[in-house]
Image (cartoon, helix red, strand yellow):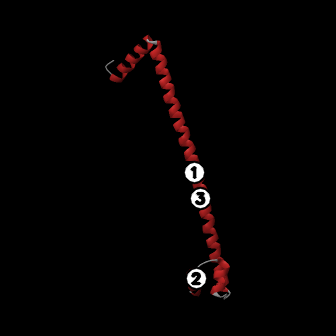
Amino acid sequence: MNEPALQKAMDTLEFLSQNEEARRLYEMRQKALHDEASMIDGAREEGMQKGMQIGMEEGMQKGMQVGMHKSKIEIAKNLLGVSMDVAKVIEATGLSKDEIQKLKVELMK
């Protein structure tokens, strides 16, 4: 009984066992604390799931954009490979003039 925390618990138990109203209030307080902790855990879990869902959707969208850009580059290379005019390659792919010029230089190597 030299442990302060144990002594405090014993004192609380003794007090609660003597006073029914105090015990009822204590139990209500404990229930409220448990309910609050449960709500926080539930909200945290829901927030994490929502964040993961949003992250996955954004990742998929970016991945698709990157894939589309790579496809445009491959198409531009093919068109340049058959000596299509740069202006027409820009029109066909939507890539910038600078991007097309870089690809043209790469193909000449």
- How crowded pointer 3 is (Cα within 10 Å; few <14, some 14-19, many 20+) is rated as few
Q: Which residue is mark 3?
A: 58
Q: Mark 2 is on which residue type?
A: Lys
Q: Is residue 77 visible?
A: no
Q: Residue at x 64, y 80 (%)?
A: 76
Where does residue 24 sit, x and y in percent of width and height? 49, 17
Q: Mark 3 is on which residue type?
A: Glu
Q: Which residue is mark 2?
A: 97
Q: Residue at x 57, y 51 (%)?
A: 52
Mark positioned earlier in the residue sequence (3 or 1)? 1
Where does residue 29 sit, x and y in percent of width and height? 47, 24
Q: Secondary structure at mark 3?
A: helix
- How many marks overall? 3
Whether 58 is drawn above or below 83: the answer is above
Q: Is residue 55 visible?
A: yes
Q: Look at the image and tell me in which quarter the C terminus lies.
A: bottom right
